[in-house]
Image (cartoon, rainbow, N blue to C red):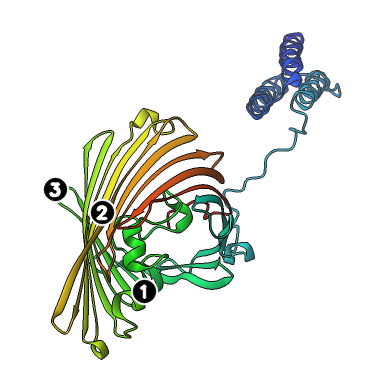
Amino acid sequence: MAHLQRVAAFAAAALLTAGGAAAQQPTQRQVDSLAAEVRALEARLDSLRAVVGTAATPAGAPSPVTPAADTGLAALRAAAVAAAGADTTTPAADTSATTRFSGHERSQSQLNPEIGATGDVRAYAQSPGQGNNFDPREFEIGFQSALDPYSHTKIFVSLENDHVEVEEGYAYWIGLPGHLRFDIGAFRQQFGELNRWHLHALPETEYPLALRAYFGDDGLSGTGISLYRAFGGLGTHELTGQVTLSRSDDLLFAGGTRPSYLLHLLNFWQLSPATYMQVGLSGLYGTNPDSSLKTGVAGLEFRLTWRPPEQTLYRDWTLRGELLALRKDYGGAANTRWGGYLSTTYKLDQRWIVGARWDYVEAPASGLVTQQLVPSLTMWQSEWVFLRAQYTWSKPESLDATSQLAVQIVWAIGPHKHETY
C-alpha cells in the first residue's frame, strides 16, 4: 500500500506541476494530453487494485487500497480539471455510431446574386474651350449569379448621360458537348482587343478613336447568340462566332434590321516565364437590302506583355495595337477606310502606371484623316479606387488641332470591382 501511495502521490505532483504551467496558457493539445494521462493512470490504478484485492486480508477488515486509491484518483482528476479548464472526468461520448442528418438546401443568402456598382466621373478642360467641364459619365450596376451547375448569368445596367439602359444582359452555359460555351442575350461583341472591355476598365478614359468612329462611342454590341471554343496545339487558341442584331446598325448598316455575323480567332503564346504574346483576327459582315448596302469590317490585333513572376505587383509592361478596315458597298460602289491605334502601359510600382496611345482613323463618309496622341498617368489608390490624368492632342485633317486635359476618378463596390467585363 505504501508503494501504491508513493506512485499516486508522485503522479499527482507531476501532473499538478504540468497543469500549473499549462493553466497559464491552455491549449487543446495540452487538454488532450492531460486527459490521456488521466485515463492511463486510471487503468493502471484499476490493475493495481485488482492485484491487491486478491491478497489475503483479515476478515471483516476494509481493503487497505481503497481509501488511498480513491484519494489519489480524486487528486489526479482535480489537477486535470484545473489545468484544462473543463471537466475531463466524464468520458467523451462515442459518436462513431451516431447518425447525423443535415440539410444541403441553399440558404437565402446563397440565392441572392452578387451585386456590384461602379462610378466613373471626369473633369476636363479643353482648348478651344467648349461644353461642360464635369462629366458624371457612367454609373453601372452589375448582377452576377450561377443559375445552376451548368448555367450562369450577368446583367449590367448603365446610367449614362441621363439614360438608363441594359449594357449587357446574357446567360451562358459552360461544359457543353465539344467543350463549347453558349451565350444568349445582349452583350459587347468580341471584336479585337478592347471592344469587349467595359468603359471604366480601359487603359485610357475612352475607347480608341477608330472603334468610336466605326462602331459608335460605346463600341460594338448586339443582341443574339455566341459560341466559344478553346483548343490547344502550338499555343492556346480561342474561336468565337456570334450572330447578332447590332446596336451600331445606324453607323454600320444604315438602320438595317438583318442579323450580322462575327468571327474572332485569338492565338496565345507564352514566350518565356515573364513574356506573353497574343495575335487575333476579327471579321464582321452584315447587309441592308433596303439600301443595297453590304458592310464588312476586318481587324488585326496583337498584344505583348512582360510581367516578371517575382514582381507582378510592381512591374508590368504591355504593348497592344489594332488595325481595322471598314468596307461599305452600296450596290457596287465600294470604298474602304482604315483606322487603328498603338498603345502601351508601364507599371512604375504597385500604384503608378504610365501610358500612351496613338490613334489614326479615316472618316467612314469623307475619308478625312484624324490623328491623336494620348499620354496618361494612372494611380491605383486601392483595388476599389483609381485616379487618372490624361492629355489628348487631336489633329483632324484640314482643321486646327485641339487639346484636352482630363481627370478621371473610378470607384467600385461589390464583387464586380474593376473587371474588364
Tell me the quadrant of the picture where the N terminus can be found: top right
Residue 214's x, y, as percent?
31, 67
N-terminal label among 3 and 1? 3
Label 1 vs 2, first from the N-terminus: 1
Quadrant location of residue 324?
A: bottom left
* Spatial CA span between label 3 and label 2: 23 Å
Which of the two discs, 3 and 2, labels the residue nearer the N terminus?
3
Mark seen at residue 153: none
Residue placed at 68% from the left, 20% from the top? 48
Asked whether residue 10 appears in the rendered view, the answer is yes
Q: Secondary structure at mark 1?
A: loop
- Tags 3 and 1 touching, CB below 8 Å: no
Residue type highlighted by circle 2: Glu
Residue pictured at 65% horizontal, 26% vertical: 43
Q: CA distance from mark 1 to mark 2?
A: 20 Å
Q: 296 left or right of 306? A: left
- Residue occupied by mark 2: 322
Identify the residue under disc 3.
234
Indicate the position of residue 147 as horizontal and vertical percent values.
Answer: 48, 69
Q: Residue at x 29, y 63 (%)?
A: 191
Tell me: residue 285, above or below residue 320: below
The residue that disc 1 covers is 248
Residue 306 vs residue 321, the one in the foreground: 321
State the image coordinates of residue 335 (x, y, percent, origin top left).
17, 71
Q: Residue placed farthest to the bottom in the image? A: 290
Q: Quadrant of the C terminus?
A: bottom left
Q: Position of residue 418 (x, y in %)?
A: 49, 51
Secondary structure under tag 2 reads strand
Q: Residue 311: which quarter of the image?
A: top left
Residue type, label 1: Ser
Q: Is residue 156 above or below residue 14?
A: below
Local crowd at mark 1 within 10 Å, few (<14), some, or many (≥20)?
many
